[in-house]
Every structure is written in C-alpha cells, then in structure tokens.
Image (cartoon, rainbow, N blue to C red):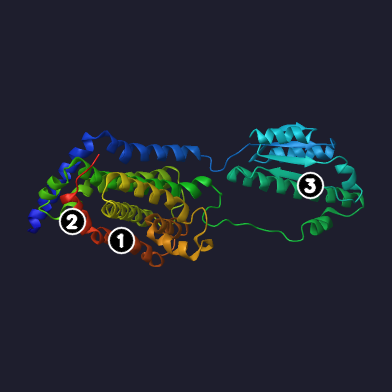
Amino acid sequence: MKDGNVIKTIGCLAWREMKRLTAIPIYFFAMVGAPVFSLVFFLSLMYHGLPTDLPVAVVDLDNTATSRMLIRQLDAFEQTKVVCVSPSFSEARQEMQKGKVYGILYIPDGFSVKATTGKQPKVSYYTNGAYLIAGSLMFRDLKTISVLANASVGLQTGTAKGITEEQLMGQLQPIEVETHAIGNPWLNYSVYLNNTILPGILQLVIFLVTVFSIGSELKNGTSRVWLSEAGGSLTVGLLGKLLPQTIIFTLVGFLFAAGMYGYNAFPLNSGWGPMLWAIFLLVVASQAVGVFMIGTLPTLRLGLSFASLFGMISFSIVGFSFPVQAMHPTLQALTNLFPLRHYFLIYVDQALNGRDIFFTWGEYLWLAAFLVLPFLIGKNLKDALLYFKYIP
C-alpha cells in the first residue's frame, strides 16, 4: 500500500470511527462526560486544600480556668472545632462511635492543681483511625495542644518561682524546629491527590474505551469489514480507529491540565511543555495497553474485566499513596508496567520540583515504549478479528 493510499485509508477509517462514536451515546459519556464530571467534582471537593473545622469532643473533669483556656486554644485551630464539652467520657465515646466527632481530648480531675504543684498530670487524647485524613489531622492538633499545655503550665510554674520568661523558653523549647514542605508547602490535599487521581481516571477510561471499541467489533461481527477497509493491515486499522479517540482524550487531558495548573494554580515549575507532552504520551501509552488487553483476551467481557482490574490497581501501585520503595521488590518491578507510574514520576520531577528535562527523559521513553505492546499480540488479535465468532 502506497503512502498516499495509507493516509487516505487511515482518514476513511477515522471517519468511520467518528460515526460510531457519535452513534453510540456511551462513548460520549465515557470519553467526555465522566472525565469532565470527575474534574469538576474532585477540584471542587478539595477546593480549600485541607479540611477545616473537624469536630472534636472534650471531656473536662477539671473545669478550671486553665482547662477552659486549653479548650479555647484547641477550638482556635483551623482544622479543629470543639462541638461537645462533656463531663462524661462515655458520652464522648458514644459521639465518636456515631461518627459525629473524630477525636476526644480528656482532661483529668485535678489537672491544674497537679500541674502547678510540680506533679505530672496526664492529658489523654483519642482519634478515630478509621478516617485516614481526618484522623491524622486530628492527631496532629491534639498532640500540638498537649505540647502547648505542657509549655503553658511550665511557664506559669516558672514565673511563680521568679524565673524570667526568656530563661524559661530556653528550657521549655531548647531547640526551635523549622519545617519546610518541599513541592507542596501549603500541605494542600488537592495538589497532593488530584495530580494523580485525575490522570488515573483518564487512564482507566482510555483502557475501557479502547477495549470496548475493538471488542464491540468482535461482538457485533463487524471486525472483518473493519479489517477489509484497512486493506488487511492491522496496523492501519488500529491507527484509523484510535486516531479520533487519541485526539479527544488528548484534549480532555489538556483540559485537566488547564483546570489544575491554570484555574487552580497548582505548582508548575517546569512550564506547560513537559506536562502536556506527558499527558499526550500517557494517552497513547494507555491506548497501546488497551489494545494489548483485548489482543490477549479477545472477547469483550474478559477484555473489559482485564482493563477494569489493571486500571484500578494503578491507583494503589504508582507510589503516590504508599511509597514504591517500601513495597516488596517484586511489586517494585511491576510498577513499571503501569503508564500512570511513569506519568507520576514526570509530574514530581517537572511540575513539583522543576528539574531539568535531562533527569526525566527516561520516563518519557518508558511511556513511548508501551507502543510496542500492540505488535506483541498482533497475530493473535488479527486472527480473532478474522475468525472469532461471538457466542451469546
């Protein structure tokens, strides 16, 4: 087939695929509707970055000016809101079991007296570990308030003994710690989560749509017509079929980038170019993996199951929630089989850290290397297109 004929054939196949995309509503929902909804939903859900006013209960058995000051300080924290002050620990525990509070601060009886007489009163706090983010933030605030309580009591006791505040601060806090969170100094959960969740959703949708578009040809018995229009060439047939999807998915990916780096002003220290290239390569790499899935299991049902399982595992294995270095060595090696893993590393290097492209070129090559996968199952897929008979 001559070059001019190849381009013309690809164009005809792309037009054929466009008619299929517009004729079946599920394509519009999966390729545009669901990703755009996910973009709006997740960006608006975490618009403020960190959750605020998380409810906490306080059991104040001391009921003195010191304990009430401690409660006011806890309520002043941005992430914490005291919604229940109770003299009964059982009542506070019931509120936690109902899910109405995420933590309990327990101030024992005689707290202020013991503190001012040099004894060691114990302030206890309980957090609900069933809620990862809420429990972690609550733990941080309750631990901070306990440290502040210790410093406050120590300051009062030392002042009563005639020690100056400057001398006391050197004893209460001999080492002053400065914390600098690199990449996300605001500790913004939207920056932390959405830069991986949204591309992960895009990757999952691409897997499913690619498998569905080829699998439906097999199921509906149109695969021979499709391959015949491609001149018997599977490569030409795949290029024509996937070209419209590539364009649509790339535009949706660019919309994701505009929402995150433009509208929400997420860190983009490397500029737009590296991340837009990463999105495009993520799209074509995901399509290549989708072709490999339907070629390996050339039935619509099994292919979609493969795509769903592989796509969902991506969210857990790419390293943004649990570090890859802490995984079993076998799993560390398997992470390279997921396009989202390499996109995530590009995002960290380029958007967050703004490193030179020299340090990240290997991840771009990894994404491009996924394009080899369709050739590995080409014969199996072509045989299925020619000879497969769907049995309902």
- Mark 1: which amino acid? Ala
Please give the residue where the numbered disc 3 appears in the rendered image.
Answer: 149
Q: Which residue is mark 1?
A: 368
Residue 127: quarter of image: top right
- Residue type for callout 3: Ala
Question: Is residue 382 visible to us here?
Answer: yes
Q: Quadrant of the C terminus?
A: top left
- Distance of mark 1 from mark 2, alpha carbons? 17 Å
Q: Residues within 10 Å of mark 1 (few under 14, many from 20)?
A: some
Q: Position of residue 241 (x, y in %)?
A: 20, 47
- In the displayed structure, 24 sits above or below 214; it is above
**Callout 2: few (<14), some (14-19), or many (20+) C-alpha neighbours within 10 Å?**
some
Compare residues 206 and 149 and report the one nearer the observer. Answer: 206
- Residues 381 and 182: in front is 381
Please identify the quarter of the rendering in which residue 338 is found. Answer: bottom left
Three-letter residue code for mark 2: Thr
Pinpoint residue 210: horizontal percent, then vertical percent. Answer: 28, 47
In the picture of the structure, the residue carrying the numbered disc 2 is 235
Task: Give the total of numbered labels.
Answer: 3
Mark 1 vs mark 2, foreground winner is: 2
Q: Secondary structure at mark 1?
A: helix
